[in-house]
Amino acid sequence: MSAVGSKLNISKVGRVCVTVADTDRAIDFYTGKLGFEKVVDEPMGPDMRWVEVQLRGTPTTIAIAPPPEGQEAGGSQTGIILDTTDVDADHAALKEAGIDVDNEVTRYGDPVPPMFWLRDPDGNSLIVVQPQD
C-alpha cells in the first residue's frame, strides 16, 4: 500500500454518479427500464435533487445528479459495468423496449466476456457484461 493510502479511511466504492438534465426522466429510466430501486431522493438546493438508485441486494448506488455549474448534463462514458447472467436475453429485452443499445452483443473471444453498451436518455453509457465463469 502507498504511504498516502495507508493513511486513508476509504472502505468501499459507495456510489458512482451520472449527470442528468431531467431527474424524473432519469429515475423512470433507471427504475422503470433497468430495474433499479430508488433509495435516496433529497432536495439539493433550489430546484435540484440528489437521487440514488441501486439494484436490490447490492451495496453500490448510482447517484443521479445535475451537472456542476457551467457544464452540460450527460454524454459521458460512465465506466459503469452491469453484470448479467444472460447478455443476449438482456440485449434483446432492452432493444425491444426501445432502449438505446448497441446493434449487437460484442464478442471479442476469451478471456473477454460478451458485452454491449446502452445509453440512458442523457447519453450516459453503461456496459452490460456476462462474466465468464
Image: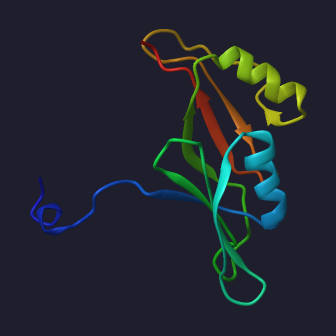
Taking the image as shown, residue 119 lies to the left or right of residue 112, namely right
Q: Say which quarter of the image contains residue 36.
A: top right
**Point 84% across, 59% down: residue:** 25
**Point 51% across, 18% down: residue:** 113
Outermost bottom residue: 46
Image spot of residue 52 (x, y percent): 61, 61
Above or below, 73 against 94 in this view is: below
* Front in this rendered view, residue 55 or 112: 55
Image spot of residue 40 (x, y percent): 62, 65
Q: How is the image coloured?
A: rainbow
**Point 48% across, 20% down: residue:** 131
Above or below, 6 against 98 in this view is: below
Which image quarter holds the C terminus?
Answer: top left
Above or below, 97 against 10 in this view is: above
Above or below, 124 against 127 in this view is: below
Image spot of residue 13 (x, y percent): 40, 54
**Point 67% across, 50% down: residue:** 37
Image spot of residue 20 (x, y percent): 74, 64
- Disc tally is 0
Q: Say which quarter of the image contains residue 55.
A: top right
Q: Say which quarter of the image contains residue 76.
A: bottom right
Outermost top residue: 109
* Front in this rendered view, residue 57 or 122: 57
* Front in this rendered view, residue 82 or 35: 35
